[in-house]
Each structure stands twice: as structure tokens, then as C-alpha cells.
Image (cartoon, rainbow, N blue to C red):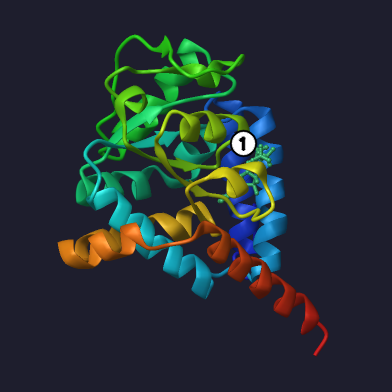
Amino acid sequence: MIPNDHPRYRSLAVREHLARCAKAGILSLEGLTAHGRGEAFDYLIGERTTESALAAERIAAALLVGARNPVISVNGNTAALAADGIARLQQVSGAAVEVNLFHRSEERIRKITGLLEEQGVRVLKGDAERLLPLSHDRALCLPGGIGSADVVLVPLEDGDRCTALREMGKTVIAIDLNPLSRTAQSASLTIVDEVTRALPVIARFCSELSPGEAAVLASGFSNRDILRAALQEIQERIAHALD
Ligand code: ATP
């Protein structure tokens, strides 16, 4: 039982929730360690949505609302942490949602799909095919989903698949707290923010942006500048940590 006046209450409660999801077979044990890496980077950005992340979230909304066939790719961590955020973003962006896992089994796909559906997400189903040039199971995706998407939102991605999706000509939006990861460096657009904070903000911008604003934002951004700004914010925070 975590006392709710504990200074790290939220973080501890999230860990407890993720441990339960791992025991239930939704999250892989490896997903728990990936969460730990995310927590470490969240400390470095101050556990808040930074200015550079907010700017990236606005651009992400512009890319999603302007896309022909946007798809949100969901793994175990994202489903466990943010099924409600995915549901809301799907509602306002019209994006399809596909489950894509590194540690893939039909049972995990079924459990994650069930969890998402409980929150009102419409999840794509069908026979996945090895459409991506990867030697692991993240290569498996649906021809009518990620296979034919022009814009793919990939919270908590691995760098290999991000690169493969880019090489297929897709626009890839990553949500990754680590601005130094291969994913962050290879995505078309990287949001350096925690997934449960990022999704509602992207959803809000999807409702607020006019088509004209979205077109301007979608065509004129530099991911290198966004990552540089995120690293600068971390540097400044470290420089003033003992003030
Ligand atoms: P890469 O292959 O891109 O170099 P990696 O090996 O770090 O990345 P994973 O092990 O799949 O990739 O880790 C997942 C990434 O997700 C980590 O960079 C971590 O910082 C990030 N992450 C974990 N939890 C969250 C979260 N809740 N919100 C946003 N990002 C997160």
C-alpha cells in the first residue's frame, strides 16, 4: 500500500500498476526496464512538458490531421499506461490503431487489444504480414494499417523499426523521453515527453488547429532543431540543479 502523501506517490503508483500489467501478461518484463529508462530521462526534463515538447506536440497534431492514412502503433507499455489517451487521440484525429509488439504472441495481442477496447479504442484486426525489413517480430504489421500508413505515431519505439518505417517513405512521429535514442534521432518528428502527458496535448491541438495552420506547421519543421532545444533544456536544468 503506497501512502498517498508519499512525495513520489504517482511514480510508485505507476510502477505498481505496470508490475500488475506484467503479471497479467500485458507488459513484457523487458517493458518494465524500458519504463525505468524513461523515468530517468523524465527526471532530467523535470517531469513536465517542456516548451520544445509542446511545440513538437503541436506539429504532431498537424501531421496527424493532415495525413491520408494515419496510424497509431501501440505496444504493451503504451497500452498499460495510456489506453484512455489513445482512445481520445483516435477520436479527434481519426487515426487507426494497430498493436505492434517486439515480444509478440497472439495471447499478448489479444490481451492488449482487450485493454484498449475497454477504453473505447477501435483496434485494427487481421492477418499481420512481415512487411517491414526487420529480423524480429516488429516486422509484422497489417497491410491496411501500418503497411499502408503515410503517418505513423510510435510511442516508445525501438530505433530499428523507426528507421525501417522511414526508409519505406513514411512520416514517423516518436514519443520518447530519451532525446539521444536511435528512435529520437531517426524519427521525422520526436516528442521528448512522457506518453501520458503527450497524448492529451496532441489531442487538444488536433481539435484546435485550423487546416491552414496545420498545413504550415506540417511543412516547416526541423527535428534536429527540436532535439537540440530538448537537449538545451536538459543542460540548463542540470546547470541550475543546485541553485
Ligand atoms: P533505441 O532503439 O531507439 O535507441 P531504446 O533501446 O532505448 O531505444 P527501448 O528499450 O525500446 O529503446 O526503450 C524505449 C524508450 O522509451 C526509451 O528510450 C525510454 O526513454 C522511452 N520511454 C519509456 N517509458 C516512457 C514513457 N512513459 N513515455 C515516453 N517515453 C518513454
Pick the residue in front: 238 or 229. Answer: 229
Vertical position of residue 204 compared to residue 91: above or below? below
Residue at 31% across / 17% down in the picture? 143
Circle 1 sits on which residue? 159
**Whole-percent x, y for residue 6 in the image:** 67, 67
Which residue sits furthest left? 211
Residue 206 in view here = yes
Which residue sits furthest right? 242
Which image quadrant for residue 124?
Answer: top left
Judge the density around disc 1: few (<14), some (14-19), many (≥20) Cα neighbours within 10 Å: some
**Whole-percent x, y for residue 118 in the image:** 31, 34
Q: Amino acid at mark 1?
A: Gly
Which image quadrant for residue 144?
Answer: top left
Residue at 54% across / 56% down in the picture? 194
Asked whether mark 1 and ligand 1 are closer than 8 Å, the reply comes as yes
Vertical position of residue 25 compared to residue 59: above or below? above
Vertical position of residue 152 compared to residue 65: above or below? above
Which image quadrant for residue 153?
Answer: top left
Ligand 1 location (quadrant): top right
